[in-house]
Amino acid sequence: MATTTTTRSFLQAVATEEVATPLRKVQMEGLVILKIIKHCKDHSPSLVTGQLLGLDVGQDLEVTNCFPFPMREEDEEIEADGANYQLEMMRCLREVNVDNNTVGWYQSTLLGSYQTAELIETFMNYQENIRRCVCIIYDPSRADQGVLALKALKLSDSFMELYRSNNFTGEKLRENNLSWVNIFEEIPIKVSNSSLISAFMTELEPETPVTQCDYDRLQLSSSSLMERNMEFLIECMDDLSVEQQKLQYHYRSLSRQQAQQQAWLQKRRSENATRRAAGEEPLPEEDPANPIFKPLPEPSRLESFLITNQISNYCTQINGVASQSFNKVHLMKALHEE
C-alpha cells in the first residue's frame, strides 16, 4: 500500500512538473545589471550578447550572474572557440560554487531594433533545452536621455506552437487568434540587492555630487535621436510595403488562377455535353495534372508581423522623445518668465 501511494505521488509530481507555471517576474541582482550595462556600453554601437545564469524558482526567474560572449565572427574555427569559451566559463563558475544554470541571454540593441527573425530562432534554440528562459534587451543609445532601456522578453506559447508548424498563413493566424502584438511577452524586472550593498549605497547617496550627466538631461535639443528614429521608421515602412506587395501579388495570381479554372471547367462541361449527345463517356471535370489546379503557396506573414512590431516600437520611442522635449521646453519657458 505504501509503495502504491509513493508511486502515485511520484507520478503526480511529474505531471505537475510538466505543466510549466507562468513566469511572473524576472529578479535580477544589481551587479548583473551593471555588468550588462558596462559590456554593452563599452562595445557600442556594435551589438554584443552574453549568457544569463541563475535559478528558476516557482513563478520567478532569478538572474544572479552573467558573462559576455566573444564577438561573433564568420569563421567556423572562431565560432568553435566561442562555444568552448562558454563551456569553460560554465566549468569555472561551477568550481567556485557560483550559480551556473543557464536561464537565458542578454543582448544590446540600437534604438530598439531587436525584433528580428534571428531573435526568434535563438529563442527556439534555447527552448529546446530550457523550459523557461528570457532575453534581456538593453539599449545603450537611450542612456544619454536618462532612460534605463532594459526589458525582459519571452515568446508567447501560442506563437511558439505556430512557429513549430512553420505555417503563418492568414487562415492559421485567424484560427489561433494571433496578431503581431502576441509574438513577444514583456516580463516585469525587479532589481534585487543584498542588505550589505543596500546599506553601502545608502551611505554613499548623500555624498553623491551632481554629475555632468544630470546637466545633459536638461538639454533641449533631441534632434539627433528623433532623426535616427525617423530614419529607422521610414526603412521599416518601406520593408512593410514590400511585404504587402508580395501579398497583393499572391492574391492577384490567385484571382487569375481561379478565372483560368472557371474557363477550363466551362470548356470541359461543354465538351462533356457534346460527348453525352454522341453517346460517349464524359471526361472528368477535375484534372490534378493540370498546372492551373496546383495550389499557390501563400507567403508567410511572419516577416510583416515583425516589421509591424518594430514600427510600433519606433512610434512609441518617438512619442516618448517628443513628450520629454515638450516638457523641457515648457519648463524652460516657465523659468524664463520668472
Image: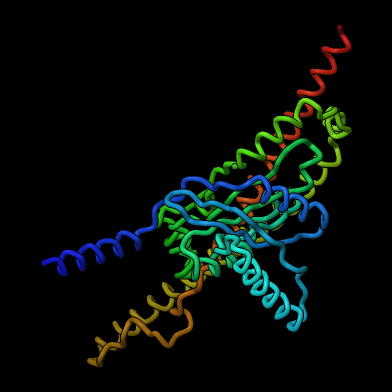
> Relative to residue 148, is residue 177 depicted above or below?
below
If the image is split into quadrants, where does the C terminus sit? top right
Task: Give the left or right position of residue 34, taking residue 251 as reference.
Answer: right
* View extreme (left): residue: 1
Residue 172, how many percent across, how many down?
42, 62
Quarter of the view holding residue 74: bottom right
Give me the residue at 55% from left, 63% from top: 101
If the image is split into quadrants, where does the N terminus sit? bottom left
> Relative to residue 216, is residue 133 depicted above or below?
below
Quarter of the view holding residue 258: bottom left
Quarter of the view holding residue 190: top right
233, 209: nearer the viewer: 209
127, 283: nearer the viewer: 127
Residue 23, how many percent across, how many down?
46, 50
Residue 110, how many percent across, how many down?
76, 52
Q: Is residue 245 visible?
A: no
Task: Give the left or right position of residue 321, taking residue 214 as reference.
Answer: left
* View extreme (top): residue: 338
Give me the residue at 75% from left, 83% from top: 77
